[in-house]
Structure formats: C-alpha cells, structure tokens
C-alpha cells in the first residue's frame, strides 16, 4: 500500500491558510499556490535518487552528486498548472507534460481529452500535480494514462485531500505515494472539499 504523507511544515500551513480565505485575490492566490508547490517539492525530493559525478572545482577534482533520474512534472489540467512554476523554480531541469481529464455527465466517469507527455516515461521520476484530491477520479485516471505509456516511478502531489480521494488512489494505484499539504474533513454533496479552497481552477485563473 502506498504511503500518505501530510507535509506538516509551518510555512506550508501558513500559506494554505492564506489561500483558504475567500478574500484572497487571484494574483495572491496564484502566487501562493505556486510557492506551496515549491515548498512541497523541497520536502518530497529528500529521497530522490542520486548518482556520483566527477567535477573539477577551482582547486581540484571532486566527486559530487546529481539527480540520477529525469524529473517530469505532469499537471492535471487546468488547476494543476498552478503548482508547476513553484516546482520548476526548485528543479529547473524538469520536463513538463500535460494531461486533461473531464467527467462524463452521464456516466460520471473521468475521460481523457488531452495528453502531451515527454518521452522515456519509464526511466523518469514523475510528479503528478493537482491541488485538490476530492473523489480521486481524475488523479487515478491521469496516473492510468501515464502507466499505459510506460511510467513506473510516480508520485502524486496535492494541496488538499480527503479520505475518499486518498482511498480511491490507494485502491487503484497502491504503488503511488501521496503527498498533501493538508487533509480536510469532508467531501460535501456537491463534490467540494470542506473547508477546502473552493474551485481552485476558477480562483487561479479568475474565471468566477
């Protein structure tokens, strides 16, 4: 079974509280979501694999360390885009793929409508990012898309999650670890997390 890690860091908690406020404007919301993405990536990257590399310093030859796997960030459109820049600022050599998922109004099943991904997914360390882990349907579907294209080392990063989404992801993908900034209490009858952030996509892009 995959592990679930709640990143209990003072700065993350402070910034999550800021984006919870309904008075936080679009600019501040977008900037803070990006900052949280970077802080989370710093914590999550503690166990990224390294390899030795020979470097010449101004003084001598030295055996240093560098990441041994290509990092690929895959936001789930559209809200996942808000976390990408913060992670790229920390790991600028990362590549970025995109997956679009929508929910069929009749079957309520998630459907893929867009996927543009880098090559060599099977050799990369992949970070799937989506701010809200609510029902878990979109996250699970996106990870399925990646696995069908050969991805093996996948981690999910979200800002806020609830038990329903966590259990769905663990059931469908027990090999994918889950990292959240916080865990909330309930998924309401409309499918929104409470206390949550509201509609994260709308708040990021000012569309509501």
Image (spheres, rainbow, N blue to C red):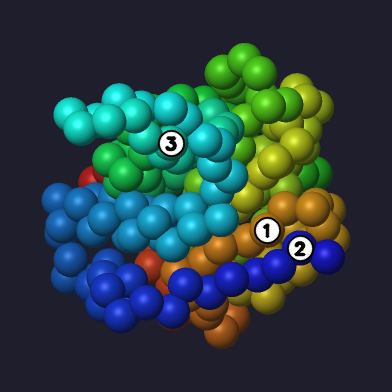
State the residue at coordinates (57%, 32%): 69
Q: Is residue 201 visible?
A: no
Viewer-nearest residue: 168 or 127: 127
Dot 2 or dot 3, earlier in sequence: 2
On the picture, is 46 further left or further right than 137? Answer: left
> Along the line of sight, which residue is nearer the eye, 104 or 5?
5
C-alpha span from label 2 to label 3: 34 Å
Residue, disc 1: 177
Q: Residue at x 56, y 18 (%)?
A: 118
Q: Earlier in the sequence, mark 1 or mark 3?
A: 3
How far across and down, in percent of the image, does residue 10 sit? 30, 80
Dots 2 and 1: beta carbons under 8 Å?
A: yes
Q: Which secondary structure lies at badge 1?
A: strand
Instruction: Please tell me whether mark 2 or mark 3 is closer to you in this view.
Output: 3
Q: Split into 4 quadrants, where in the image is the N terminus?
A: bottom right
Q: Which circle's residue, 2 or 1, is located before the other in the chain?
A: 2
The disc label shown at residue 63, or none: 3
Secondary structure at badge 3 equals strand
Task: In the rendered view, tell whether residue 124 sits above or below residue 7.
Answer: above
Q: Nearer the viewer, residue 39 or 159?
A: 39
Residue 2: assigned label? 2
Residue depicted at 56% across the width and 84% down the height: 185
* Secondary structure of the residue carrying numbered label 2: loop
Can residue 59 be seen at all in this image of the molecule? yes
Q: Which quadrant holds residue 62?
A: top left
């Amino acid at each position: 079974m995959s592990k679930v890690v709640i990143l209990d860091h003072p700065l993350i908690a402070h910034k999550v509280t800021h984006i919870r406020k309904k008075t936080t404007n679009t600019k501040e919301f977008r900037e803070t979501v990006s900052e949280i993405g970077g802080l989370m990536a710093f914590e999550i990257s503690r166990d990224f694999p390294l390899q030795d590399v020979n470097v010449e310093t101004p003084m001598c030859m030295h055996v240093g360390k560098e990441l041994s796997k290509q990092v690929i960030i895959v936001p789930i459109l559209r809200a996942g885009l808000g976390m990408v820049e913060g992670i790229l600022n920390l790991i600028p050599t990362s590549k970025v793929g995109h997956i679009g998922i929508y929910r069929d109004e009749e079957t309520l099943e998630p459907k893929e409508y867009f996927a543009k991904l880098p090559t060599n997914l099977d050799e990369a360390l992949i970070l799937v990012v989506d701010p809200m882990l609510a029902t878990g349907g979109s996250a699970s579907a996106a990870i399925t898309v990646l696995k069908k294209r050969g991805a093996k080392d996948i981690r999910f990063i979200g800002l806020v999650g609830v038990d329903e989404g966590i259990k769905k992801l663990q059931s469908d993908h027990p090999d994918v670890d889950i990292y959240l900034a916080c865990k909330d209490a309930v998924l309401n009858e409309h499918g929104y997390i409470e206390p949550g952030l509201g509609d994260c996509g709308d708040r990021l892009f000012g569309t509501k």
